[in-house]
Image (cartoon, grey):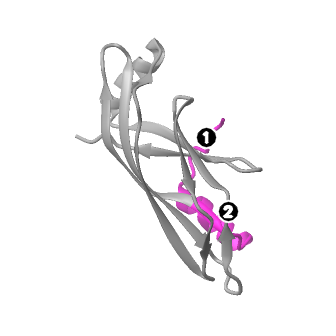
């Protein structure tokens, strides 16, 4: 898994819309509601995530099927977000809202240090990637809830 760094999601979406006119799915909004890390190395999180499906085609509706997003932290899976098949009208978008609460995630010592550093920088990284025949991955950054 490699994360796209240095490009914003808007940059990527704008390039896709300008060049391909294909439907695009991306994380539109995310909030870290809870981040708890104990001395035993167990991490608990709660995330609110809005995924947006956009159809930039002016001539046809887009049908989205088999939509699954994997959410992970430091390579450890937290959950998989699943959507039933849905349609997006031409030149339109559809939002899918999720609230994800993880069970306790056991962390190695190096991962515990990374969580501590993330708190100090006020930035923690969770990766989301689309699961399908062609895997597309991108990263989203969440600010800790203070």
* Residue in the foreground of this view, choosing between 31 and 44: 44
Q: Which residues are magenta?
A: 1-25
Pinpoint residue 63: horizontal percent, then vertical percent. Answer: 67, 71
Q: Residues within 10 Å of mark 2 (few under 14, many from 20)?
A: few
- SS at badge 1: loop
Pinpoint residue 16: horizontal percent, then vertical percent. Answer: 68, 66
Which residue matches tag 1?
Answer: 3
Vertical arrangement, residue 95 with respect to residue 141, above or below: below
* Residue in the foreground of this view, choosing between 47 and 9: 47
Q: Is residue 42 left or right of residue 91?
A: left
Q: Residues within 10 Å of mark 1 (few under 14, many from 20)?
A: few
Disc ID at residue 65: 2
**At 47% across and 15% down in the image, what residue appears?**
108
Give yes or no for contact between labels 2 and 1 (Cβ–Cβ under 8 Å). Answer: no
Pinpoint residue 65: horizontal percent, then vertical percent. Answer: 67, 62
Membership of 21 in magenta stretch: yes
Q: Residue furthest bottom?
A: 59
């Amino acid at each position: 898994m490699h994360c796209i760094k240095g490009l914003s999601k808007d940059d990527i979406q704008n390039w896709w819309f300008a060049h391909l006119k294909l439907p695009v799915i991306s994380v539109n909004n995310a909030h870290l509601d809870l981040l708890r890390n104990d001395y035993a190395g167990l991490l608990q999180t709660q995330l609110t995530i809005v995924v947006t499906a956009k159809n930039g085609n002016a001539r046809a509706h887009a049908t989205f099927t088999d939509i699954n997003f994997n959410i992970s932290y430091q390579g450890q899976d937290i959950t998989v977000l699943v959507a039933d098949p849905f349609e997006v009208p031409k030149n339109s978008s559809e939002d899918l809202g999720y609230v994800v609460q993880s069970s306790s995630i056991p962390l190695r010592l190096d991962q515990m240090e990374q969580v501590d550093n993330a708190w100090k920088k006020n930035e923690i990284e969770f990766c989301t990637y689309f699961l399908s025949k062609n895997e597309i991955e991108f990263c989203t950054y969440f600010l800790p809830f203070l």
